[in-house]
Amino acid sequence: MRWGTLLAALLASLVNAHARAGAVVLYDGRVVEVERTLADPTDLWIDPDDLERVNGFVLKPEGACIDDICVPVRQAENSDIFITRSGSRWFNVAELADRIQQPYVVDHDTGVWSFGAIPAQRASFIDRALAPDFELPDVHGKTHKLSDFKGKKIMLLSWASW
Amino acid sequence: MFEELRDRNFVIIAAAQDSGGAPAAAPWYERAKTTYVSLIDETHRLSSLYALVNVPSAVWIDEAGYVRRIDEGSYATTHKLGDFAFGRDDYAPMVANWVQEGDASPHVKAVGTLAVAKPTGEQALAEPNFQLGVYFHRRGDTAKADRYWETAQKLNPDSWNYARQDWSFTPEQANENWTRKYQTLEGKPYYRPIDGLDAAQ
């Protein structure tokens, strides 16, 4: 798999200069369009500069990090998670997901990747019952964040018209 | 009653789990003349984050941000937004008691002790499938939306939200769909009963 992945990425970069039409990423209630990707049926290679708007991670010298989670990424050499091709750097978001046990599903026809919750980020809710924060628009289009109400007792109600 | 509670550092936040967005949910909020925070939640974000499988559900959160109670699809009858008794006469007084008594209320768990089930691998994978369904539904690709919504339902059959949202777009079959799924419960409750917290009452 490892060499297959690298080979696919290499071939894609040779055939297709650098990139193809791109991808759409669904994560955390957001829809993020990514213009530059490497053509690869099994992995999602993006420009590391796009990583933060895709899933909140930032690629630092020590690895891909968010909050107190850091996944080591060696950038001096090519690997399943990071490669350099013709001076361009590429980061594999699908491999990151595998390493942090984040579930995902891809619609190959359209290049839409949908990522589920990151287990490490769910721990405070599952282990300690801390309320996960979120933001949503109200009926008038104004955005509200749960944490804006901290210091009050809150009753959150889910309902539906259906 | 809830107007009075509001002065006591208490807020109600409602979130419509509607992939139809504001056009589906806003008329209901309007009819109920809501005074609380009325959110539109097209991707069922609240259900996903709090692992809720049915509507209506309620999550009680204290001043420090700890969940002290979750009533998941717990109300015996169809809820009405304008009526926060939600079909149970004893619900509003329980909320009021908590707002007034705080930690001393018999209706809440101690800080950090509420048990939240860890999702199985399949349940966790259901969520990104459901989100793909929402994405394609918004773009009018019904065939794809159906495919991913059906996968989500198979991966997490406990979620009535996944199923009922899907059925809402084929109202003529909704009754039949509901009956078929309901029969698979084989006597297990459709709405989870209000838990043992209230036995002390």
Image (cartoon, helix red, strand yellow):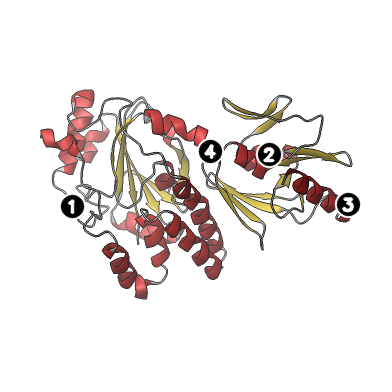
Mark 4 and mark 2 residues within 8 Å of each other at the beta carbon? no
Question: Mark 1: few, some, or many residues within 10 Å (few <14, many ≥20)?
Answer: some
Instruction: Report the quarter where the N terminus of chain B lies.
Output: top left
> How far apart are the alpha carbons under marks 4 and 2?
15 Å
* Front position among marks 4 and 2: 4
Q: Amino acid at mark 4?
A: Ile
Q: CA distance from mark 1 to mark 4?
A: 36 Å
User: Which part of the image, by quadrant, shows the C terminus of chain B?
Assistant: top left
Q: Which residue is mark 3?
A: A14
Q: Are marks 4 and 2 on the same chain?
A: yes
Q: Nearer the viewer, mark 2 or mark 1?
A: 2
Task: From the viewer's perspective, tell me whether residue A96 is left or right of residue A152.
Answer: right
Label 4 to label 3: alpha-carbon separation = 34 Å
Q: Nearer the viewer, mark 3 or mark 2?
A: 3
The kind of secondary structure element at disc 2 is: helix
Measured Cα–Cα span from mark 2 to mark 1: 47 Å
Query: What residue is shown with label 2?
Result: A51
